[in-house]
Each structure stands twice: as structure tokens, then as C-alpha cells.
Image: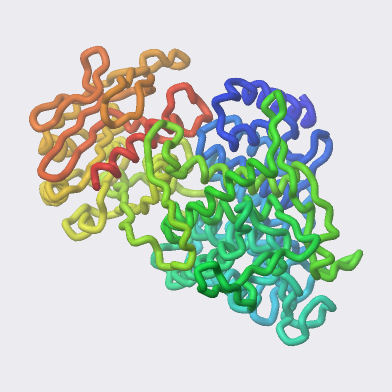
Amino acid sequence: MTLLHKIVFVAAAAAALSSASAQNKSRGQKMAATVARQWAPGSTSAHAAEGKWAYEEGVLLDGMAAEWHTTADGDFFRYVKASVDRYVGPDGTILGYKPEAHSLDDIEMGRATLLLYRVTQDRRYARAARFLHDQLAEQPRTASGGYWHKQVYPNQMWLDGAYMAEPFRVAYAATFQQPQEFDDIAKQLLLMDEHMRDERTGLLRHGWDESRQMPWADKQTGLSPEVWGRGMGWYVMALVDTLDWFPAEHPQRPALIAALNRNIAGILKLQDSSSGLWWEVLSHAPHRGPTLQKQPDGSVRLGMVKAEDGNYLEASASCMFAYAIAKGTRLGYLPETDASAATRAWEAIQKRFVTESSEGALTLHGVVSVGGLGGTPYRAGDFAYYLREPVVDNDPKGIGAYLLAASEMEQMPSGSTPSGRSGLLPSSKNFSHRDPAPLPRVKVLVDAWFNSQTRQNASGETELFHYKWSDDADSGYSLFGRAFQRHGATLLTLPEAPTPENLARVQVYVIASPDNAATNRTPHFMDKASGDAIERWVRSGGVLLLFSNDPDHTEFEHFNGLAERFGIHFNAVLSHHVVEPDHKPGEVIIPSGTGVFASGFTAYMKDTSTIRVSTPARALVTDHGDVMIAVAHLGKGTVFAVSDPWIYNEYADGRKMREYHGLEAAQDIAAWAIRQTR
């Protein structure tokens, strides 16, 4: 089968799968399914032969990956993989890449490439990512140390470059343990925030020529003339995505969060009051003017200056702002009151920019095709220039931003989440308050002491894996971690024995499949001191999640020394044994009315132990007489115990058996655990 035939085959398969049950899909799922049906992997066109390694494709894949993470629709992951595979060869070389261009735009697709390495552990993706990372080491810089946007744009930083380079670079540094990178990653973003400010709007101009040589550059500041909507979108998306990977203890992290707050504050002030959207050129958008207007009650307030003629509401910037605001509020970087602005924008995007065909395919309208500075033909970067660029349908950059925003809207507690749990949406529209949300964030700790298995990554560093937040492969708990983050939780890892001191700072503690001598040559067994610390922590209100395993993969004697304190005993038996391809022995019926899961469903637990309960524990789920899940309450705290690690990525990310609802189970457990802390 030729490469072209493979591409067409994957697209056809995705189309067939994506057309099923379309009426039950979210807007993001519908858009992602439309992409998979209409565009061959690796292209931004209906023509399979067209396509290139480019940032437009990369942004589209960022959106597809976000939808995969949020919905566990394995078709979306397969689309990302097929797209990258069109360009990355068996030896990791990238087809069509031009190193001499020194273009930050060409770095962006490294995000999808690195994701594929983390999920599949295929080292060819790591080699391609390393190549892109090494390209950044050779990228020309301005006198202040900022990356040139491209070789053909000397001494210039563009806001676009923040998104093209830094989210990939920070993920690479975290993956391959390069802490020395974080200082410069922060520097690139903060240079823009420091030097590119527009005094009137408080936002950032599109470009900065530090040499002040370009005709478009102000001779005093080096700045381009206008604040471009999508330019600001690139910047704030870069900030929220970089913070995903940026170390919590790094001294520049507060500065990055402050930059996000500062720029979102300016963006919110320019949200169109009548539509809830944002304008193509923000420096010519309606704003608080210098004139005073007398009100009917006799009071006086600042008037509003109308948008200048020709300016228009633009889709991609509106999607980008909705994404950055929603994600920033969910993760606690922004005040929770900002969330309502994102929701309002998302609803407006559907009404103004999205149409749906009778077959369920979505079209995104109203995206400006491009925006740049200099070059040939020359782009002056003034108001008239931005209005001359064509506005198109189904632009891949716009669709990528739409999917990113959709992934956040699907996680927002707007009265009901996909699995039926209720939540509260802040209704305040007071956007002037910029202090972080006062409600405490739940901290969720995963054990890396009793299960401390390691592996060598593609660069030779030793890394923890197996039931860890940081592990995106089949063996990891990264999807479980995202389920907690859906509710704004902070994820932590404990690579040492639990003590009263290190448990005091967390509300939820996860211990999964403690090592035995077969799984770890130097295992750490549960001991009395650790058990005492954990029991005291539970009694004082902690929520403990215990996941056992089958006898070949977990230790029972010492682990039961902890579990039995709560009336739970894991039986060292091999139950629910599966011999491929017969999955029926691994099926477990989760009934409705458990108080943990939103509804009844069929789960998949392969090769498990079983549980024996005594006071104060009670059986929550049984299967053919075997207790599979138990719950105990002790003092102010709660213990949740399962006979299998169960919701690790292999059975939660939708690439294998989506019918067993592993992601929804993880989300329900996370939501329930957080409720117990309250």
C-alpha cells in the first residue's frame, strides 16, 4: 500500500467512525470528526497530495490532541499520528524541513511529534523532536537575547513566535530533564511582555524590531503600529500552554502568571459588549474613550469609542482568547470570575462563525487568513494592512484554535459535565479584579515510593513510570491526572516515604500497585511509620485512593498492613484473567447508585486481585461474589480501594477499548474524591 493510499484509508476509516452517533457529540467532537472526514492526515486540504510540515498543520494537530485528551476518542489520536507520520521517517528525519530558514513557524509541529513519543515511546519521534530542539539552539537572536522570528526577519520578535517555539521547548525540557532551559524559556516570553506594550490598550503590539531598522518599526520603540487580535491570541495561548510544563518552584513562574493576568485583563476590557467576541485589530476596537457621558441619574462615566470603519469581529482570535481564559481559570492562574467571559465568547462563536451541514459537518467562518510584517509584497502592519488580508472559511489555524477552545468548554462545569455531574459557573462580570481566585486548590499526590519503577528515556535519562501523572504511555496515569485537573486540582508526586509533614500539604493521596521483587529490584515496602502517618492523615480528613493488582505485579503483605487499618484486605489471587482476544472475563458491571460513578456501566479490569472487607469498610462493587471496589470512612477521612489499577492510560485514552468508559470512570473517581475533601 502506498503512502497516499494509507492516508486515504486512514481518512476513510476516521470518517466512518466519526459519523456514528453524531447527534450525541459535542461541538468539538463534531469539528474534529469533520476534519478527519474532509482532510487527509498531514494536509489542510481535501486533496491528499497537498500538505507540508508547517505551523498551520501543527496548530490543527494541537486542537485534535486536545480533543483526544478531553474525550478519549481514539480516532483523533490516530489522525494526529497519521499526520505526523506523513513527514517523520523511520530514522526521525523530517521530510521537507529547511534548517537554513531558521523559522520558528517550523518548530510548532514538534508539539505533536513529542506527544507521539511520550504516548508510544517510539524513538523516531524523539529523534525528530531532538532535531527541532537543536534547531532552536542555532536560532539567531536579537541583542536582548530574543529569538528572531525567521532568518528573513532579522532582529524581530513577533508574538506568533511565542506559541510556535516555547510550548514545544518547555515540554521537551521537561520530558528530557533539561532544567537549564527554563530560564531562557521564561525570558523569551517576558521579553515580549516587557518591550511590546501598547500604552493605550495595555496589550502587546504584533512585532518588535529591536534594531529599529524596519520601515514599519517605530523609531523610538521599534514596535509595529497595531495590536493584532490573533497576535495576542498566540501570546496568551503560549503562556497557558507553557505553564503546563513549567516547574512549580521556578522563580520566574510567578512572572509568567502575572504576564498572563496583565494581558488577559486588557483583552477582557476589549471584549465586544454586544457580541462577546473580539476584533481583528484590537487597537482600533471599541474602548473607553476620553469623553465623559452624563447618565439619566445625573452621574457621569467614561464613554465608549466605536470600532473604526472596516474593523470586524474575527473568529480565530475569539477562539484563542476563549481557550486561554477558560484554561487559565480552570488551573487557577486567572480569577474564576473570568470564566464567564470565555463562556459568553464560546456561545457567540457558535452563533456567528459556525454552520452545520445536514450531515453534521461543521464549517468555521470568519478567520483572517494571515497577518505579517515586512516581506514581499511589503506589509506595513498598519490598520489598513490588516483589513486587506482575506477572511476565509475552515482555516486550519482557526480550526485548531476552535478545537482547543472546545476542549476547555467540555471541561468547564457549566451546570453539567459530559458524565452528568453538576457544577457552578461564576456569573460575576467584574473583570477588573486581578487577584487569583481565593478558593483553595485541591492538591492530589501520587506515590512514587512504594511504586518506584523507572525506565530509560530516548535520551538516556532515568525517569519514573507506571501509574504516574507524568507518564503518557499505556502504563501511565496522565489521563487520571487530567481528570483531577478538570476540577482545577494541582498534581504532585511523592518520591519518598510519606510522613506527617509531606502529607499535611495535600488532600488526596494515590497509591497504585506497590512494587514486589519481580517488578523492582529495590522495592520500598509499606512500613509501620508510613502506615501510621497515612492513618493519622486519613483520620484528619485525607482522601486515600488504593489500587492493587494481580500477584505477579504487586506486593500484598506489607500493602495490606496499611489497607487493613481501614477494614480492607487485598486477596493475593489472580481474578478476571484475560486471554486475548477474549475480553469478557475482564468485564465488571458497575451498578448505578454507587455514589461515586455518575451512572451504571461496564468496566474492564484485566488480571486483578479481589477484596475482603470488614468494619469500617463496605463493598461498593461486587462481581460474581468478588468485591472489586470498597469504600471506608475513618474519622473525617475516606478510603477508596480497587482490586486493579484499572484506569491507567491503556484503558482510559480510547485508543483500544473505548466501550468500557475508562476516561469517564477516572473523571467520576476524581470528582468524587474532590467532593470528599470538601
Residue 163 visible (yes or no):
yes
Q: Would you say 311 lies left or right of 641 here?
A: right
Q: Would you say 318 lies left or right of 490 here?
A: right
- Image point (76%, 27%), residue name: 8
Where does the image place residue 188, in percent across and percent down from the top left? Answer: 60, 71
Q: Would you say 252 lies left or right of 591 here?
A: right
Q: How many marks?
A: 0
Where does the image place residue 257, in percent across and percent down from the top left? Answer: 48, 66
The foreground one among 212 and 165 is 212
Among all residues in the image, which is located at the extreme bottom?
220
Q: Quadrant of the N terminus?
A: top right
The foreground one among 9 and 35 is 35
Among all residues in the image, which is located at the extreme left?
615
Q: Would you say 166 lies left or right of 579 here?
A: right
Quarter-of-image position of residue 138: bottom right
- Image point (74%, 43%), residue name: 365
